[in-house]
Amino acid sequence: MEMRKLTEALTVSPQITPEDVQKIKDAGFRAILCNRPDGEGNDQPTFEEIEMAAKEIGLECLYQPVTSGMVQDEQAEEFGTALTHLPGPVFAYCRTGTRCTTLWSLSHAKDMPASEILGTAKAAGYDMGGVVRRIVNGGKTPTDTGDAKFDVVIVGGGAGGIAVASSLKSRMRDLDIALIDPADIHYYQPGWTMVGAGIFDPATTARTMGSLIPKGVHWIKSAVAAFEPKNNAVILDGCRVVKYDRLIVCPGLKLDWHAVDGLVDTLGKNGVTSNYRYDLAPYTWELVQGLKEGRALFTQPPMPIKCAGAPQKALYLSGDHWYREEIIGNIDIQFMNAGGVLFGVKDYVPALMEYVKKYDATLNFFHNLVSIDGPAKTATFEVKKPDAEPETITTEFDMIHVCPPQTAPDFIRVSPLADAAGWIDVDQITLRHTEFDNIWSLGDVMNAPNAKTAAAARMQAPVVAANVTADILGGNPQGAYNGYGSCPLTVERGKIVLAEFGYGGTLMPILPKWLINGTKPTRAAWILKELLLPPVYWGAMLKGREWMAKPEKITGNDPSV
């Protein structure tokens, strides 16, 4: 007998026998719900036999038979009603448990997000992809899908989505492209570090989505609920269905603020801030200016996160201000890093360590922020050092800059496109999906082992555009992504350590070393970050102008082709 827990109130199972009933009671269940019709299998006990065994030991029993593959809307409603009336927790069974899970999924379609339903079922070992449209439709069978159809559908209107749409249009003007994104505003997120240091005005990092979507690209202003890759379909909230010949998935990361207990309640006050949000970056600068003495914490969660250098960029620029104000000796700077190194590419660490020393910052590795009490100004960390017992420590702060834990969005993690860890499963060279050959991904949600930065997306967009175009024309992949990513580490106002690297930490500087030596802090790199990269982003990357971003060519000997 298998017990597959869906919720605290419901566990499902394949077919049981009368001998299993006592075990069910011993496990704490108070009712049994049968969803398998009698006579489905030759060796199947009847419901009457199960009910008799259950009644003998005081378990309530209910028979709600459902024909395999024919779950009706009304039956799902009856299942939901039964769960509210039966004493819980309830143990439900059918031949495999799939019908019970389907009934549960549809019964909760009105009060739970589709991604949560799909994720819960997936965790129990059940794939609800076959009824995803009904789940998105509130548990009801859609009567009219109202399908729209495009040559290419792009999910996500961030840096990757708009860049790849523009790159595709520059190659094939007549291509019928739809871009799906519910947001009204597009943000230049790399600029928020500079906002948090009083260098950029927040308004310069935001533009309307409509002003950036390339001419001729259809904007579908909606959220995605699920994918049906075998049907070449994307299901939107409200159960609208968008069909495609080719799909590109690049929605960006989910910032999981709720993963840190108490954080949401205190963000933007009590000295708690984050440059990872447009509305909070100005508060960072306000706190830095206002702090004359005390303790400043800067946190970094477990990887992966977008722009792994951003948490320490906030530290360096804050430290630089206090250094210039000649109060650095009054500030206790603590870097609380869940990882075990300052930066993942060792070539850049010596230059960064010089600034750690300059600002007298303490490096605390293997410290992961788990909770925060804003009014009390305390932060609690789980410490898991190698070869040591895990411990929990709580420290006081006067200001704290929080980098939130980050995951793929829920609708990505539970989709058929994701790998076991929840990321879009792609070939790391061509960025084509490993299973569905008419799907590609770029940006933060795919599982290639590269840094999740805007610079990476700038290189990936032409690769995907070249390979989608080649596929449309009936050819082999043309573009190769080498893992390039860039992280301009703002170590002080006016100087940057420009980290540029590819797969395996290989250094990949684009500009000549005489102009910018990336392993050293330079004024030239600062000028690039402050004055050149924003117009390159708005005027080149998002316009399909592949300045210094032409994709590498795939050779005939490339094993990934």
Image: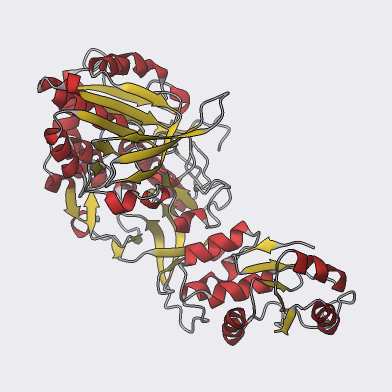
In this rendering, the answer to whether 370 lies above or below 76 is above
In this rendering, the answer to whether 248 lies above or below 237 is above
Name the quadrant of the N terminus. bottom right
Q: Position of residue 372 (x, y in %)?
A: 35, 44
Determine whether, in the image, residue 471 is placed left or right of residue 254. Answer: right
Q: Position of residue 29 (x, y in %)?
A: 70, 70
In which image quadrant can residue 70 be found?
bottom right
The structure residue drawn at horizontal position 40% and vertical position 74%, both measured from the top left corner, is: 238
Name the quadrant of the C terminus. top right
In this rendering, the answer to whether 17 lies above or below 532 is below
The structure residue drawn at horizontal position 57% and vertical position 66%, both measured from the top left corner, is: 129
Q: Report if residue 300 is visible in the image.
A: yes
| Tally of numbered tags | 0
Foreground residue among 545 and 100: 100
In which image quadrant can residue 22 be found?
bottom right
Q: Position of residue 329 (x, y in %)?
A: 18, 19
Q: Which residue lies furthest to the right in this view?
A: 43
The structure residue drawn at horizontal position 80% and vertical position 81%, both measured from the top left corner, is: 55
The structure residue drawn at horizontal position 27% and vertical position 38%, both measured from the top left corner, is: 401
Determine whether, in the image, residue 321 is placed left or right of residue 133. Answer: left
In which image quadrant can residue 464 be found?
top left
Q: Which residue lies furthest to the bottom in this view?
A: 74
In this rendering, the answer to whether 408 lies above or below 88 is above
